[in-house]
Image: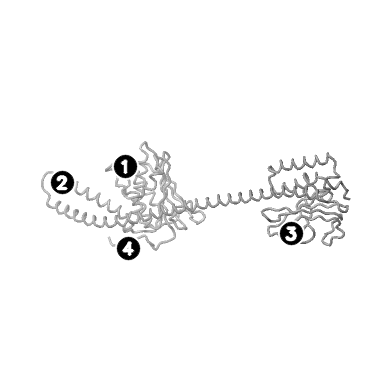
Amino acid sequence: MLQPVPTNLGQRNGASETQMLRTLNTFAVDLMSIPSVEDLIWYVAQNVVGKLGFIDCVIYLSNEAQTDLTQVAAWGEKNPFGRNIVNPLVIPFGRGITGQVAQSGKPIIVDDLVEDENYIADTQPARSEICVPLTSAGNVVGVIDSEHPDIAVFGEPELEILSTVAAMTSAKLELLEESRRSQKRYEDLVSAHSQLTSETRNRKALEAKLFETRKLDAIGWLTGRFAHEFNNLLTVVSGNIELLELDASGPNSDDTLKTIKTASGRGAKLIQDMLAFAQRTRLVPKTLNLNTLLSAFCENFERSLAEHVETNLDRNLWSVFVDPLAMENMLFNLVLNGIDAMPNGGTIRITTENVFHTLPEGRHFPSELPPGRYVRLSVTDHGEGISAERLPQIFDPFFTTKAVGEGTGLGLSMVLGVMRQSGGTVAVRSKVGEGSTFELYFPTGSTDGGNMTSSDNQ
């Protein structure tokens, strides 16, 4: 049963008053270091009210809607379970004495609970009760309640003590709530910043992609126009060369004609590469197995240039629909580039494999490649590699790192143009000092030609 204790400051001796002041002082010191609402509530119940002469203490907290109080901590014989509430009591605002305090925001002292119609009888009935509100930002957020088995136990001194504890507790609750709001604002700010950074990064990537696409489209259009005009001039030059050959005389005429024919041939090759980049070359695609074409290419290449090419070919490779001559031309450009990138020697490696491109795996594939089945042909060298600054430029027409006269800068742009016109694309992975890998993606499962032939008349 609840046991009576001295009930006012006049009845307390000097030692008890000293203990009360010491308890409040300790509470004030510890208050700032209490980390959470749960720790605060249990500290108040056990280490503050429990040491101030009150024989029991129950603390309730309100829900956000301020419609109900829920028992969250207790001290005394009513809670023999330590820091744990079994079957916590829930009291609606306005019901009982604690509910009235929560609704009005004003403390209540009841001298005789038997005569109070609002008293909700407990398992251990009491006669006196004191109840004070916990407030934060003008709202009642909880209630501190204490009962006693005797009549008229609580007076102004007890109300002053419990109100002081409630005020200190309320201030800490407000600080904890503001800390929670600040943490939430910080998390929201971090999330918003992260989202903004991601959106900015995506926008910049899209802008760069759009700029690159527009640049290549513009260059392709100009290249196509120029190639057509230049091709007409070459036709005239070639015709005149043939006429000169029929009526050639003089000791140096043969050398002169050879020089003119060589220049004319180089010009024709230049035109073909430019048209390929502009995706206006005439392709004659066929259904074939790349492994067969690669084996013949490597054999001829090694025989003619005495350069070894290592291969790793998928035996179950799917068929593709591609122009064989254009394919050989692309391979020739890529392999020669790889050899040039290894001035101290090295081995070129060509691999083929079947790949599935799905949306979840899109990050592993070029961004412009639609999902589907592809044959991937990779040409790898272990040479000097390409710097990150130059990597975005390597497919631009006429871009080259070779000395003047050693290259036109159209080899890779021709590869890109042919691959796009064939319904695929080309990607590159490179690291300075470790080499480069060019990956050609050929779509499979279609033999209708799609966009593999040009509708433009050459």
How far is the residue under mark 1 from the one under mark 4? 35 Å
Residue furthest left in the image = 250
How far is the residue under mark 2 from the one under mark 3?
A: 116 Å
Quarter holding residue 389? top left
> Amino acid type of disc 4?
Ser
Q: Are marks 1 and 4 in contact (CB under 8 Å)?
A: no
Instruction: Choose mark 1 or mark 4, whichever is in front.
Output: 1
Question: How far across and how far down the image is residue 238, in percent?
Answer: 19, 53
Q: Earlier in the sequence, mark 1 or mark 4?
A: 1
Residue at the spot x=13%, y=44% of the render?
252
- Quarter of the image for residue 31 reads top right
* Sequence order check, earlier mark of 2 and 3: 3
Q: Nearer the viewer, residue 84 or 283?
A: 84
Q: Earlier in the sequence, mark 4 or mark 2?
A: 2
Helix, strand or loop status at disc 3: helix
| Amino acid type indicated by mark 1 | Lys
Residue at left 31%, top 44%?
304
Tell me the residue that label 1 is attached to: 402
Residue at numbered disc 3: 104
Q: 197 and 300: which one is in front?
A: 197
| Amino acid under disc 2 | Asp
Q: Real-space Cα distance between discs 1 and 3?
A: 87 Å
SS label for mark 1:
loop
The spot of residue 179 in percent (x, y) is: 63, 48
Contact between labelled residues 3 and 2, with CB atoms less than 8 Å apart: no
Q: Depth check: 75 or 336 in front?
A: 75
Which residue is tagged 4?
455
Name the residue that disc number 2 marks: 254
Horizontal side of residue 266 vs 436, given as left or right: left
